[in-house]
Image (tube, grey):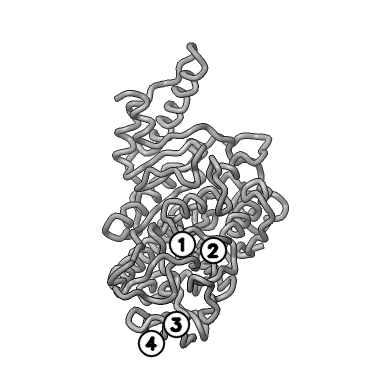
Amino acid sequence: MKRRQFLNGIGSATGAALLTGHAPGWAQGVAQRASSASDRILVLVQLKGGNDGLNTVVPFGDNAYYQLRTSIAIPRDSVLGLDARVGLHPELKSIMPLWQRGELAIVQGVGYPQPNLSHFRSIEIWETASRSAEYLPDGWVTRAMNAGYSQRARFTADGVLVGGSDLGALIGARAITLNNPETFVNQARFAMPAATSGNAALQYLLRVENEINEAAQGLRADPYAFTTEFPQGGFGNSVRAAAQVVASQKGKAGVPVIVLSLGSFDTHQNQLGTHANLMKQLAEGMFALKSAFTELGAWDRTLVMTFSEFGRRPRQNQSNGTDHGTVAPHFVMGGAVKGGLYGQTPDLTQLDGSQNLTYSTDFRQLYATVARDWWGVKPDTVVRGQFEPVKFLRA
């Protein structure tokens, strides 16, 4: 296998500055749970295809919801109530313990101005934190990692993408794609030690390969024997692989970002059964992730956040599905999370000119929160503008 094939195969990208340093003063509460910003883990969970927010966080107290969705609305008596007006899809029952423990925050009405309803362009906007008509070359996570640290933590890699190859938020970072640990280890044997002479470009390429090989070494040992039961299926396997990545980091610099994906949520027809199955996979996977990371003593220094390119239209279509929309809620989970409902429940009687929902929380506010309150990075270096963080992390 040639080096170019190897790098393409595992998704290695250009080098980036890494997170390091001690937890800043504003995060003393979090600092008690994580000794430094470089100890913290961010798990991004992509809901590929555009998740239907109204059937995820259900506005069961709003009659307009049932008028807009005569055959695909979730019955009131099935909703897992969060308050007197909204609740969760019944197949999300596995994450209700996180809600009850105050470890699940739900940010409502998430979107952005001038939304694009193309899958490819909209997910690019989310991953680079760009404006609707702006094209950026690097991911928002990469910019956070490049945000002016005077020291460099020696992470084995900037991030790991489990079950995918699109670098997304890690564009421009040293990232690895990992379908499962065994495959990763087998691929890593092609990485050769860095050369000490020759042209600079070749030395750099070899050095990146060597760093990836070092990252694989932690997975060569016998896998951690979890007592956690992981769900069957692709997403359950991805959660298991993510947990093994974290287990392999004990005593090492580790990997600060893990990206998982579940889908497709592109439910244009016969939505009810498909969406219910995806909700079940998501909830069971997130519960298993919490359990496994708790076993490893890592849950209190882990932040889990969902994202999706867009939501769905409020009104169902003629195929008992929903078409591309604008706004959706997103979940934030972790031992340092201050649980509860954030943002405004969408007003189903005040749709825009295209009969879509209007956003109340810009998605870049979530990224600004991660930058400032999780990593201690100036938010404007990550989201390139002034976006008020959402206070879903404990002080």
Q: Which residue is mark 3?
A: 65
| Pointer 1 local density, CA inside 10 Å: few below 14, some 14–19, many at least 20 | many
Q: Sequence order check: which comes first, mark 1 or mark 4?
A: 4
| Pointer 2 local density, CA inside 10 Å: few below 14, some 14–19, many at least 20 | many
Vertical arrangement, residue 231 with respect to residue 257, above or below: below
Residue depicted at x 27% and y 57%? 233
Q: Split into 4 quadrants, where in the image is the C terminus?
A: bottom right
Q: Amino acid at mark 3?
A: Tyr
Q: Which residue is mark 1?
A: 310
Residue depicted at x 49% and y 19%? 201
Q: Which residue is mark 4?
A: 77
| Pointer 3 local density, CA inside 10 Å: few below 14, some 14–19, many at least 20 | many
Q: Sequence order check: which comes first, mark 1 or mark 3?
A: 3
Q: Residue furthest top?
A: 197
Q: Which residue is mark 2?
A: 111
- Spatial separation of the CA atoms under disc 1 and disc 4: 28 Å
- Side (left or right) of 21 relative to 199: right
Q: Sequence order check: which comes first, mark 3 or mark 2?
A: 3
**Dots 1, 4 in contact, CB < 8 A:** no
- Spatial separation of the CA atoms under disc 4 and disc 2: 29 Å
Is residue 221 or residue 274 the one in the foreground? Answer: 274
**Dots 3, 2 in contact, CB < 8 A:** no
Q: Amino acid at mark 2?
A: Gly
- Side (left or right) of 343 relative to 297: right
Q: Split into 4 quadrants, where in the image is the N terminus?
A: top left
